[in-house]
Amino acid sequence: MTRNTYYLDKNVHFKHISAERKWIDLRLGEVWRYRDLILLFTRRSFALTYKQTILGPIWLFLNPFLTSIMYSLVFGRIAGISTDGVPMLLFYLCSNAIWNYSSSCVTSNAHTFTSNSGLFGKVYFPRLTVPLSQVLAFVIRFSIQMSMVLVILIWYWAHGQIHPHIWALLVIPLSLVQLGLMGMGVGIIISSMTTKYRDLSILVGFGMQLWMYGTPVVYPLSQLPDGWIRSLSLLNPVTMPVELFRYAVLGTGTLQPVSLVWSWGFTLLALFLGIIVFNHVEKTFLDTV
Amino acid sequence: MIDSRYKEMAEVGLAIRIKGLKKVYRLGQIGGTTLQEELKRRWEIWRGRDDPNTKIGQTARLTGETFMALNGINLEVRQGEALGIIGKNGAGKSTLLKILCQITAPTEGEIDINGRIASMLEVGIGFNGEMTGRENIYLSGAILGMTKAEIDRKMQDIIDFSEVEEFIDTPVKRYSSGMFVKLAFSVSAHLDSEILIMDEVLAVGDMDFQKKCLNKMREAANVQGRTVLYVSHNMNTIRRLCDRCLVLDEGKIIFDGDVDQAIALYMGIEDHLKTEYHFTEESRPYGRFSHKLSIERTVIEGVCDDPRIGQSYNNPSFGYGGYCLPKDSRQLLSNYGTIPEKIIRAVVESNDTRKKYIIDKIMRLVRMAEQAGQNSVVGIYRLSMKSGSDNSRESASLSVLRGLIDRGCTVLIYEPSLGGLCPVEGGVLVAEAEEFKSRAGIIAANRYDPCLEDVKERVFTRDFFMRD
């Protein structure tokens, strides 16, 4: 089916719906017109997450903090994994923040269709606004978490224990955009497929855990021995953005230009495919969900 | 190409043009439900065997059978027209609206739409209980297609219309359900779209608010020149809102034109009722106790021509009963949804104050009637308790009513004033409404019933009791 809104004039809205199929149909203009909705969805997901909790938004800080302490104990103290000389807590705080960001972009979007089928069944709006708003919400959440990390970071920096690369800090927003779009792309591909096969939604939880251990989150890339394991890790599109992030913030990290290019290529491909499949499924998913 | 399509439509003032629209649903299982099943199915089919997921006794052909929800719809709607769409459940009304609202895609055919569409397939789209009224206005408004600036501009109007100003910054989960629908409807009612598509959404809030909604929609069509498509089972609102009406049946338009004719045709579809049996039981007077029960399966014979119907109560020739249901009873029945195939009418006239006894008598007759006919029975009971003071008559009638509901009867009373059940504000029936609505009872009052004099528009239907 194609359906397009044509704005022949500012005041003329003309729409043509037909049964013909058109595969490559991004319909991004429509999404842009609904930008207010994206912001409102983002606000909603914030407003709702911590409603009726005692600690409220404090969880935003508490959660990664506790996880990082646990990681420091298990991976740092017990397993004795090196952190390239970076203070353990700081290392895990940063790793956690960036990984949580990218993995939430995937998992939250993997359920777009099934969890919104009630809403989608009653009114039309560009469905892509939902995953975009999710990503935006996670960007904000990440920024809030990083503000806490920043305090600790500055303290260590002042004591000369870490040496951030200031110029590379400018790359962080770009990495965030990349991880967000990649997560969204992968997420909406999964959500498009879960409209028919519910198996995938179960697989996602497990898959993300696997993906985390395949990404240098609890260990730095430098710890991987040369060989197939390292190559595999470099093939992982999340590896480079994570390393880049740590390189900028903590001053340690292994950069691999080829892997970085691949990572971007993967992002764009996942995004492009994701939007196409998503737009395609969105038209009739109510009949199969 | 699009430009020429637009010009074509704009020249003759068309808002919607539908050509050869079809929508096919597959019956039975759609593919496999899990990846594993789907893979198995593909594998077995590839090896030339039967689908392993087919249930025993179900032929493989059936799983592939299709159902035409819409089977070739051609339709042109002019700008400013208020078009009603009626039809039985499953006739394709909602599918048509869903395709127009872009919620699902057509299988065949094409649609041109000149103007923005506001879809009101449900009130309260996008509402979230945790958020305040104001936050919900923003979110719901944006989902329905408004920009934030637009909502800001209309905020005060929306709040005023909704009548819930003092609670606007309270989370809507604390709202009563009435307040909730009022607020939700107000948001939809303030959309600027040229085309409004509504599915049974006018029946919200209390009577005054319903009237307000209806007026708002009529204003949209008649004054502002917007196009309205309205699906409803409530013939009254169709009659009052629409100036053209479609009847859909089995995915096709079987009538397109005058509203009254359409309604008559739609009702006619269900008209195949005949009187087949008759039971009467009359007790001999025993002291001051006596009762007369009669039950018959009755016919809805079309609109009754009895000249007395509709006349004022003071007219001495005015009488109730007869075998022809008055005009409004038909409407009431249609409000109930589909007219039940078999209707049993019980007339109870009783001096007997032993209520349980009366209830048991009625039930026995209903059972007999049910056995004679095979389908489920909806009883229409006219209760007339003759003894006692006004108050005791009321309570006697109510007890009988309650007893019948307790025994699982669907009760439709018409002409309630005869039984002393006066459904005016504050009357017994209203007071009991809360209790009845959660149960199987349906209470309908004939609009011409004298106790409704001062509330002319007030007709108690299932909607009234089931609303919350």
Image (tube, coloured by chain):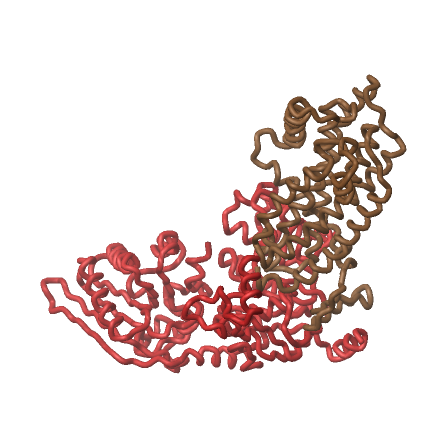
Chain colours: A brown, B red
Front-most of B275 and B179? B275
| Image x and y of residue B257, in percent | 57, 81
Is residue B394 visible to us here? no
Q: Residue at x 60, y 55 (%)?
A: A194
Q: Is residue B427 left or right of residue A286?
A: left
User: Which of the two residues, B459 or A85, is positioned nearer the viewer here?
Assistant: A85
Eyeballing the image, is B251 above or below A266? Answer: below
Residue drawn where x is 35% and y is 80% of the image: B273
Give the residue at x 38% y 81%. B272
Q: Which corner quadrant of the image does residue A28 belong to? A: bottom right
- The N terminus of chain B lies in quadrant: bottom right
Q: Is residue B133 visible?
A: yes
Relative to B252, say whether B151 is above or below: above
Depicted B225 relative to depicted A150: above or below: below
Depth check, front residue: B18 or B437: B18
Looking at the image, which residue sits at the far top?
A: A159
Q: Is residue B380 left or right of residue A110?
A: left
Residue B25: horizontal and vertical position, in percent?
Answer: 56, 70
